Structure formats: structure tokens, C-alpha cells
Image (cartoon, rainbow, N blue to C red):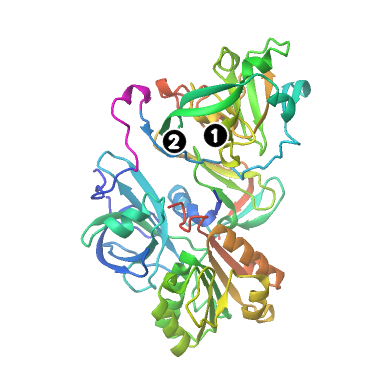
Amino acid sequence: MSPPFSRGFHRRHQTPAGEEGRVPPGQYVTQDFPVLSAGPTPHTPTEKWTFSIKKGSDTERSWTWDEMSALPHENVTADIHCVTRWSKLGTHWQAVSIDTLLAQVQHDAGFVLAFCDGGYTTNLPLPDVTNGQAWVAFGYDGAPLPPEHGGPARLLVPHLYFWKSAKWVRGLELLDHDEPGFWETYGYNMYGDPWKEQRYAGD
Amino acid sequence: MEGTAVRGRLTWQTATVSQLVDETATVRTIDLQVPDWAGHQAGQHLDIRLTADDGYRAERSYSIASAPGEPVAITVERLEDGEVSPYLTEDLRQGDQLELRGPIGLYFTWEPARDTSPLLLLAGGSGVVPLRAILRYRERTGSTTPARLLYSARSLPDVIYHDELDHYNQDRGVDVIYTLTRQQPPGWTGRTGRVTAAMLTDIAWPASQNPLAFVCGPTSFVEAVANALVGLGYPPGRVKTERFGATGAPGGP
Amino acid sequence: MDALDGNAIGGLLQEVFGADMTAAVGTCAFCGRVGPVAETVVYLRAPGTVVRCRTCSNVLIVVTEVRGRKCVDLRGLAALAAS
């Protein structure tokens, strides 16, 4: 028996006409930028911020905020897709490519585990954070990334569900195996391709 | 078996809007006719679920504004960027149906037979809703438990249930103290500004009387007030809290 | 975005456990804090509901909805006693 429909109630935003091809299955387009969080918002000052690439407990390479800011960075425009079903088209970021960072490290890792202030983690295969598919983003819409959206910097991996674009990122751990991060531990998909609707483990 | 309420088992039921009452410019009380309502306790809430015709769903929680024994009512504040509250406060009509489940929550409840200590109620904005249910129940049961309400509101027109609260204050032995944080009417001699530890030192029942406090409103209000009461010697277990989030509604706008 | 408290998931937990859990007393597996579920710190707007200890901020409970079924992870609680 279907639930009673609420007369006159509708979601706040509709997919703009002609954009349906940009929207993965089961998603709807929003004009907002919803803030989703699994914990309190960290507030790390840039003077204390570092980004590290680690192998186990060893730090292979680390950058301070100033060092990161001196690296080549780019403007990235991307559609982003949250597993909670909202998609936001044409978002604008200012970011450093992960390719730039990994180029400074010798490794043969197959996987990474991103780690963040507040303890959040998420896992990704190495081929998904290279070849121009992933960034450390510190700007959104021409302004510094606000804390509630992951500032000072977050991961940006738009081809996967946005829980993989870890907020408050502080580094990547290089691994030879795929290690489930926070949401993956609680039943979400290890990979998370929105076009194949890989939301949960087993999808 | 949809709609059948079994005590203890929480199922979605379909309720009908029987009456709408505008409390303030942005706040409306919705009286509901719920066919299998199993009764509720003062302080409890219910969950509302809305379904759009494309299947999109939104769920929110609202405190029950009415006393045990009265028909179920909720009081909803319209939030500027809200998705559900504008619908409930502006679009909903008498006779419309809503899905709800409840009553929910045995922690934040007041029962006069069990709770005989002096009662301290602290409301931030729409946090007054479950506290009004408590005062209404105190009234219905003829309880003479000493009761005091400190209600923080932006301005006098933002005070929900104003006449009813003034009646409890004048005629029913409840101390009702307003503090108006943004705007006061001309000649206002009452309190102004946010609730502070100093204000609570004046107003709260002394800890030695073993009072029971209920604090409800935005998260920042609840944290500040609860911490201040513990600072005045209230054992943490005697300060019950219900946070509505920054936006003032539990679970979001 | 402020966190809420365990009152906000009263309905969700009652759906899962079949009884009110807001007054149930939980023990944090990390710091040992003991208190009612109603007084935990709750983050609702996420791919799941995350319940954290008010003292140490560690995760006590995570509730997700996977293919229409609620999944509850309680590993952050050393104990949970119905009242």
C-alpha cells in the first residue's frame, strides 16, 4: 500500500531542462550546496596545516600550507554527486592536482587511504586519484574553502560519489591493498561509481 | 496493517489536519485528528513524513504542543530556507492528510506524580513548545508543583502562546519570565539579552531544592544554559536537554 | 551546522529496537562516559546517522539505510542498558 501523498508538497529544486544526461541514476539536481557531516567541524589554522603522503607510519613527503600554495594549481569545474541523492552541476574549485603531489614520491602503491582532521577516512584505488581525476581543493567559487565544506582543504574526486572527496583532508596513506574508510566500514561501496549506482557494499 | 497503532511499536499513521492556528507571524499550530493515537506524555515529540507525488520524501520531528489527554497538536516555526516548515505553515490546509509516527521519547518527559520537585523550564525560541505541553499538563492535573519558565525570544511578537503563558503567570502560580534578545516594546521593564549565568543565578530554583530543569531550543542556547545550571550546582542528571539545532527545529528545517 | 542530540533519533531508534531508547543508558567504549542516549551528540545530515560521545567525540553508534533496510552499528558502545 503506497503512502498518502502530501498534497502540494514537492522537493525544493528540479533538474534543469536538458541537463538530464549529466545526472546519474537516482539523483536530483540541487542549487544549494548541502552540508553533510559525520562529526564536528574542525578548524585547523593554515599555520598548523600540513598535507602528508605516508607509507605506514613513515612520512614520505609533507607540505606546509605555504608550500602547497606555491605548487601549480588549477581551476576545476565539475559536477558532483552525493550518495544522499543530490547532485550539483558545474561547481568551481581551485585545487592542486594529486598528480603533482604524487610525482614527488617514489611508490608502487595500488591504493590510498585519505585521512583527515576529525578522524574521517576514505579509500580510493590509485588509478582513480591520478591522471587528472583528483585534487586537493582549497578554494570554492573563487573564495577560500569554508570550514563547513571542508576548509582549509578537501579532496576532490568528482567522478566518484562525493563521500570520497574527503573534507578536512590532511594526507594520503599509500597501501598495497584496499582498506575500507569510514563510510565503507559502515556498509557503503568500496568504489562508489555514481554512474553504476554503487552506493552500498554489494552494489 | 498500516495505521494500526500497537503500544510500543512505532508505525506510520495517517492523520488529518483538523485546525490551524497562527500563533505568530511565522509560527502555526496544527491540530491533528489521529485515528489510532495511543496517548502521549508531556514533552514527547512525533515524526512527520511528507511524500511528494514523484516519491520524494522528507521527514522531520516536532514536539507535541498539547497536553496528555488533549488532541494531538504540533507547533511549527517557518524557517526561511526550510523545505518542510514553509509547507506546514503556509500550504497545509484543514482536511489535508499527514503521515506521522509517535509519541516518541521517554527521556524528555514530565510526569507530575513522579516529578514533584520544583520545575524549571528554559525555552529558547520554538523550544517553548514541549515546555508549554508540560505547563498545560500541570494545569490539567491541578498540580501545585512550583514552576518557573524563563523564555528567551527575539521580540514580544515572537513570543508563542503569549496570552496562555501570561494567564499561567497571573492566575496559576507559574513564574513566567521573558527575556527579549533583539527588540523590546516601548517602556519594557523586563529582561533583555540572551540568557546568561548571572540571569540564571537570579531565576533558577536553588540547587538545594533538588529542582528538575528542562532546557529546549537551539543547540547553542541549550549548551550555554545547561552548562550554567550545572555551574549553579544542578546535578547533570537533573538537567534534561533537547536541542533543536541552529535552525530551531529538531532534525532540520 | 549544529549537532543535535539523541532526542532527534528517538523515532529511528524506536523503529530499530522496538522500544524507546532516548532514556536508555549507554557507556562509551573509548572514555567510559555513562549517560542517556538522549544526551549524545547526533549528526543527522550524512550518508548515515552518526552518534558521538559528548565527552570524547568518538563514534558510539552509526545507523545507515542500505537498500531500504536500517543497519545499526553499536561497536562504539561498551554497554547499552534500557531504562
- Residue A144 falls within the magenta-colored stretch: no
Circle 1 Cα neighbour tier, 10 Å, few/some/many (<14 / 14–19 / ≥20): many
The x, y position of residue C75, in whole percent, is: 61, 41
In the rendered structure, the answer to whether residue A96 lies left or right of residue B72 reads: right
Q: Mark 2 packing: few (<14 Cα in 10 Å), some, or many (20+)? A: some
Amino acid at pointer 2: Thr
A202 on left or right of A67: left
Residue beneath disc 2: A84
Dot 1 corresponds to which residue?
A186
Is B136 or B5 nearer to us in this picture? B136
The image shows residue B227 at horizontal and vertical percentages of 66, 64
At 33% across and 25% down in the image, what residue appears?
A19
* Quarter of the image where one finds residue A148: top right
Q: Identify which residue, B174 or B182, lies in the foreground.
A: B182
Whether residue C82 appears in this view of the structure is no
The residue at 66%/39% (across/down) is A118
Q: Secondary structure at mark 1?
A: loop
Q: Is residue B201 above or below residue C15?
A: below
Q: Is residue B56 visible?
A: yes
